[in-house]
Image (cartoon, rainbow, N blue to C red):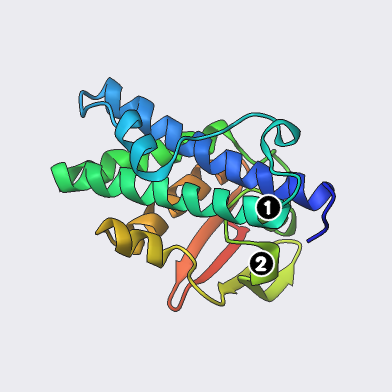
Amino acid sequence: MSAFLGPIHHWLYHKIQFQEEWIQSILHAAEQNGWGSFAENLNADCGPADLRPLEESIDQGNIHGWLQQKIHAEEARFAVLVTELLKADASRLSALEEISYRFGQANAVPQGTSAAGAFRLLGDTLLDGMPCDHVNQVLEQEEDHVAWRQTQCLHHEFWEKAGGDAAVYYALRARMIQGMLSGSGLTFSTGENRRFAVGKG
């Protein structure tokens, strides 16, 4: 990556911020549901969130390293928070799925968006490592249908370290995406070996 801030850095920071907003929605719901307050412990375990504008927070002398560290912190924060919530009560999974769905609805894909447009929007929103990781490989692409696979899972290590299961992450992520697509006429589906698709119907 460049030593100077450019569009790709702002693009990646937006994805980091989006995941933190998702985390904040879960933290808020946890308090509202009487599950407890987790923000302080989460900050102590994984580092605090920083949602300031990129120019105010980034280490200009180490842009690539700073962004990588922020991605790792966000991955850890999500894994630790959800795993701790489910360790206390595994039945909370359905509530977490609903929280994620509502968060997706609050960040909905505009009506009339094509499947190809929705796929691009998901790529601009969801955190899947650094651009150089080339995680998402397109298998089929038409205006009304896009299928892709993840070439590697960059989330597993964080969930394993937290004592959780990355399958939970994918379940919550799927519900969040379904929420994003809920008013668009598009559907999101998952298959084996980390295969996914967005299409009409």
Q: Is residue 21 left or right of residue 55?
A: left
- The image quarter containing residue 43 is top left
Mark 2, Cα crowd under 10 Å, few <14 / some 14-19 / many 20+, is many
Q: Is residue 193 left or right of residue 45?
A: right
Secondary structure of the residue carrying tag 2 is strand
Sequence-wise first label, 1 or 2: 1
> Residue, x 83% and y 48% (percent of image)?
7
The relative height of residue 40 versus residue 91 in the rendered view (above or below) is: above
Residue 29 percent coordinates (x, y)? 33, 27
Residue 82 percent coordinates (x, y)? 31, 46
Residue closest to the far front = 61
Mark 1, Cα crowd under 10 Å, few <14 / some 14-19 / many 20+, is many
Kind of residue at disc 2 = Val
How many numbered marks does the figure carry?
2
In the picture, the quarter occupied by the C terminus is bottom right
Q: Looking at this view, is 154 or 46 the one in front? A: 46
Task: Identify the residue under disc 2.
Answer: 146
